[in-house]
Image (cartoon, rainbow, N blue to C red):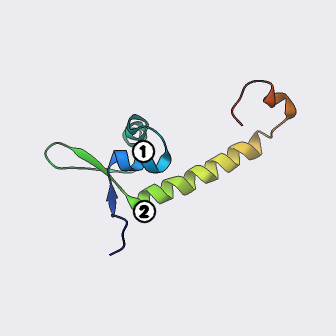
Amino acid sequence: MSGTPRFLTLADVAEVLNTSSAQVYALVRRGELPAIKIGGRGQWRVEASQLESFIEKMYTETKAFVDDHPFVEADAGRGQEV
């Protein structure tokens, strides 16, 4: 077995994505990030391969967004994150 666990907690996923556990929970509850609920307390787990697929999907969606919304110099003056 490799050093990477097969299943990650929502906190682990949040660390990988550099976001909050609440944001990851929202992604799971909206069905954007596949996860399973295990145990009597209903703890969420995300399979590492599902996280990698999600990241690839986000790259694809971001590229489509950038292609559809080309950067123009006027955007820089609006305080938008670049």
Which SS class for mark 2? helix
Q: Residue 82, percent across and down?
A: 72, 37
Q: Quadrant of residue 51?
A: bottom left
Residue in view at x 76 percent, y 39 percent = 69
Q: Residue 17, percent across and down?
A: 49, 47
Residue in view at x 81 percent, y 38 percent = 71
Which SS class for mark 1? helix
Name the one closer to the observer, 67 or 12.
12
Q: Is residue 33 above or below residue 6?
A: above
- The mark that comes first in sequence, 2 or 1, is 1
Q: Is residue 41 above or below residue 16?
A: above
Give, as a three-letter code, the residue at label 2.
Ser
Residue in view at x 69 percent, y 43 percent = 65
Q: Is residue 38 visible?
A: yes
Give, as a three-letter code, the residue at label 1.
Ala
Q: Residue 58, percent across and down?
A: 57, 49
Q: Give the number of the disc on residue 34.
A: none
Q: Is residue 6 left or right of residue 23?
A: left
Question: Given the current orientation, which residue lies at the most extreme left position?
Answer: 40
Name the one closer to the observer, 48 or 60.
48
Q: Is residue 33 visible?
A: no
Q: Is residue 72 above or below residue 77?
A: below
Question: Given the current orientation, which residue lies at the most extreme bottom position?
Answer: 1
Name the one closer to the observer, 32 or 72.
72
Residue in view at x 41 percent, y 49 percent = 13
Q: Is residue 77 left or right of residue 53?
A: right
Q: Is residue 81 above or below residue 68?
A: above
Quadrant of the image for the N terminus? bottom left
Q: Which residue is mark 1?
A: 14
Q: Which residue is mark 2?
A: 49
Q: Is residue 75 left or right of residue 13?
A: right
